[in-house]
Amino acid sequence: GVLLQAHENFFFDQPGNRLWCAVFSAVWDGPLKLQPEEVLEARFMPIDEVLHQAEHTPYCPDSLAALKRYLNQSVSV
């Protein structure tokens, strides 16, 4: 396994999608085992490319919110 570093919990609220979220990070260089019921696709991409692509391509909205919160937290630390 890999140790997770907890960053924060937050409430995500938009029409039809209200949930509590938790943000974690980890460093792992082993293989990824995706859960097909939960994950359609996984790719390694630079963060700036993800943010740019998210302006034009649908991303999971609560995951995108978590990424933006993580980046804002990392900059302010």
Image (cartoon, rainbow, N blue to C red):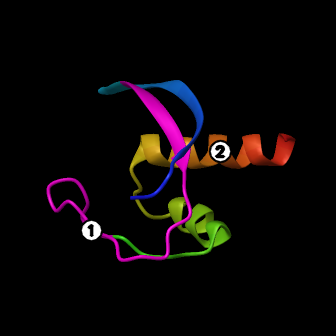
Front residue of this view, candidates 55 and 62: 62
Is 42 placed left or right of 11 in the picture? Answer: left
> Residue 15: image x %, image y %?
36, 25
Pick the front one: 10 or 56: 10
Residue at x 51% of width, y 48% of height: 4
Q: In front: mark 2 or mark 1? A: 1
On the image, the x and y values in percent for residue 58 come to 40, 58
Q: Residue at x 58, y 49 (%)?
A: 67
* Residue 69 visible, this angle: yes
**Quarter location, residue 51:** bottom right
Looking at the rendered image, the quarter that the N terminus falls into is: bottom left
* Secondary-structure class at tag 2: helix
Give residue 55's position: percent from left, percent from top: 55, 59
Image check: 1 left or right of 5? left
Quarter of the image holding residue 32? bottom left
- Residue 15 visible, this orientation: no
Q: Is residue 16 magenta?
A: no
The label number, if any, that marks residue 70 in the structure image: 2
Q: Which residue is mark 1?
A: 33
Q: Amino acid at mark 2?
A: Tyr
What secondary structure prevails in the magenta region?
Answer: loop
Q: Position of residue 35 (x, y in %)?
A: 20, 59
The mark that comes first in sequence, 2 or 1, is 1
Highlighted magenta segment, given as a residue range: 19-41
